[in-house]
């Protein structure tokens, strides 16, 4: 027996307690040496604080009773339970088999899905239930309209980020009468446990975190190309789904009533198709709706840019020099957050109006070449391509962090970094060091893909606004009488934007002022809106 000083007095029994604690610590160290891919990953959020408190009080009781042997048994039992729970929650990445090669079925016997691990469904369901609490408008829409079933007969094929918030949207569309098949618009943003929960509930979902490019297009094809089922509505984020159908299954557009698109990149592609006379169905531009632009793009990015950078790099923002490429709504949100944290923020911009806004907000407008050698962080949010080129990357200082907040992965020329003279070193999930021959390295996040949804999360409440806008756009296009919408790109009607906003106001216990008849007549408005003309800039 080792000689240790007892916290419980000089008794041998007290020494035995401490000795057992030391032995347990040794066993724990030995356990940590064993090869495992579970250990340092995020553990289950389902282990409640109450169970932790119960565990602590149980140990304290044992300690007071000087019953060391029982205390060690309890510790080991709780430790084992904790590890088992964590193992079932995490991605089970010790199984390197591609989901495409697995045979999985849900509890109802269906196999019309392809996800990482169907066993994670219970955890995903809890994530969805949490999201529902922060998505009041969607839940209100589900409650008000599910009796009418305004989407009865709709067959929606979707390609968006598959998160708990998207799951609430999908289940709302289903409650309104639609059938849904879904793939992911980003290879890194899928929450595997949420995909499992959707698959368990019978939704054909084809997505998992860490897909290859080939997997990405395969999943989209599995959503679209299915015997006995053809979509009549498209909900897209980025335009990849629309592009795939145009490329592979153009005849499907004969039965498709409309497209709802929510990203800058996807909307740009739609306008290109429209200009070329190749857009053969009506499309709703959700991205430029007021509720999407002013809330999702601005307020969401204002919070999630800091979250994404902190989780991946642990960087301190105070005093850091940051250049933000683009001063649209996403850029405005990023700049405001970084400025508030004490960063020195530069802005690049091609639009003189946005550029003047940046100057009036206190940011220095520069060309990227002027500051690329000195900045600590480079953030792109333009929706363009080759904003940060290999020349820029070569001139960056050692340790510069490079990331993208735009939808597409084209803003940073990542392909130019995959050359023999550069070394890639994965340091943690979604974080790569790209090392030059002289030892200089940059920190590349999410391989140039969307930072917030690839590396962290986004505020659920803001996504409620966007998701409600998407749902209303779906209802509008699906139920519109023939001839209302031609083969062109449309903005969401102003009345719908106002309705989406009004559904979220009760969360803040907000009380709208109502116009009197005299005031409404004076302004030439309907008392119930819309309150602003279409040309109004909020």
Image (cartoon, grey):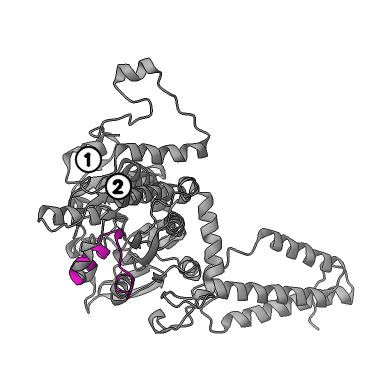
In which quadrant of the rendered view does residue 189 lie? bottom left
Q: Are marks 2 and 1 in contact (CB under 8 Å)?
A: yes
User: Camera-side residue: 389 or 518?
Assistant: 518
Magenta residues, start to end:
223-248
Image location of residue 391, percent across then percent down: 17, 63
Let me know if residue 230 is in the magenta part.
yes
Is 127 left, or right, of 365 in this rendering? right
User: Camera-side residue: 358 or 441?
Assistant: 358
Crowd rating for badge 1 (residues with CA inside 10 Å; few <14, some 14–19, many 20+): some
244 shown above or below 151: below
Image location of residue 390, percent across then percent down: 19, 65
Q: Which residue is mark 1?
A: 354
Is 350 left, or right, of 135 in this rendering? left
Q: Which residue is painted at 16% across and 39% down in the image?
A: 352
Q: Secondary structure at mark 2?
A: helix
Q: Secondary structure at mark 1?
A: helix
The numbered mark at residue 331 is: 2
């Amino acid at each position: 027996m080792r000689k240790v000083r007892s916290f419980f007095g000089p008794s041998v029994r007290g020494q035995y307690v401490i000795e057992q604690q030391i032995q347990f610590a040794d066993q724990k160290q030995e356990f940590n040496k064993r090869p495992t891919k579970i250990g340092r990953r995020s553990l289950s959020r389902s282990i409640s604080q109450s169970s932790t408190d119960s565990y602590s009080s149980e140990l304290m009781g044992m300690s007071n009773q000087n019953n060391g042997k029982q205390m060690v048994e309890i510790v080991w039992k709780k430790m084992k339970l904790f590890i088992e729970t964590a193992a079932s929650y995490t991605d089970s990445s010790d199984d390197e088999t591609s989901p495409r090669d697995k045979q999985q079925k849900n509890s109802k016997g269906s196999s019309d899905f392809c996800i990482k691990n169907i066993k994670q469904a219970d955890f995903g369901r809890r994530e969805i239930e949490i999201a529902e609490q922060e998505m009041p408008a969607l839940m209100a829409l589900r409650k008000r309209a599910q009796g009418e079933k305004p989407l009865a007969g709709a067959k929606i094929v979707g390609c968006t980020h598959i998160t708990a918030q998207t799951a609430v949207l999908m289940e709302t569309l289903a409650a309104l009468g639609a059938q849904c098949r879904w793939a992911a618009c980003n290879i890194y943003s899928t929450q595997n446990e949420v995909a499992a929960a959707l698959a368990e509930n019978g939704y054909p979902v084809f997505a998992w975190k860490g897909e290859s490019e080939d997997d990405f297009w395969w999943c989209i094809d599995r959503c679209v190309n299915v015997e006995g089922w053809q979509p009549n509505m498209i909900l897209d984020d980025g335009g990849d789904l629309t592009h795939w159908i145009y490329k592979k299954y153009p005849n499907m557009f004969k039965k498709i009533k409309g497209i709802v698109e929510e990203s800058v990149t996807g909307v740009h592609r739609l306008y290109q198709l429209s200009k070329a006379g190749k857009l053969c169905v009506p499309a709703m531009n959700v991205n430029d709706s007021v509720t999407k632009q002013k809330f999702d793009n601005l307020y969401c990015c204002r919070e999630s840019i800091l979250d994404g950078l902190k989780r991946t790099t642990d960087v301190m923002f105070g005093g850091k020099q940051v250049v933000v490429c683009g001063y649209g709504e996403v850029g405005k949100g990023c700049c405001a957050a970084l400025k508030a944290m004490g960063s020195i923020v530069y802005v690049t911009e091609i639009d003189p109006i946005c550029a003047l806004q940046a100057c009036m907000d206190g940011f220095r407008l520069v060309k990227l070449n002027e500051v690329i050698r000195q900045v600590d962080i480079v953030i792109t949010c333009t929706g363009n391509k080759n904003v940060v080129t290999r020349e820029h990357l070569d001139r960056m200082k050692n340790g510069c962090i490079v990331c993208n907040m735009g939808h597409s992965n084209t803003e940073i020329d990542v392909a130019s970094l995959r050359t023999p003279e550069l070394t890639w070193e994965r340091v943690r999930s979604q974080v790569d060091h790209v090392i030059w021959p002289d030892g200089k390295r940059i920190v590349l996040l999410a391989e140039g893909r969307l930072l917030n949804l690839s590396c962290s999360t986004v505020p659920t409440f803001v996504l409620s606004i966007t998701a409600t806008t998407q749902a209303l756009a779906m209802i509008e296009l699906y139920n519109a009488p023939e001839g209302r919408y031609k083969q062109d790109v449309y903005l969401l009607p102003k009345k719908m934007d106002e309705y989406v906003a009004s559904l979220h106001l009760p969360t803040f216990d907000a009380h709208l002022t109502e116009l009197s008849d005299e005031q409404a007549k004076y302004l030439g408005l309907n008392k119930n809106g819309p309150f602003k003309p279409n040309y109004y800039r909020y």
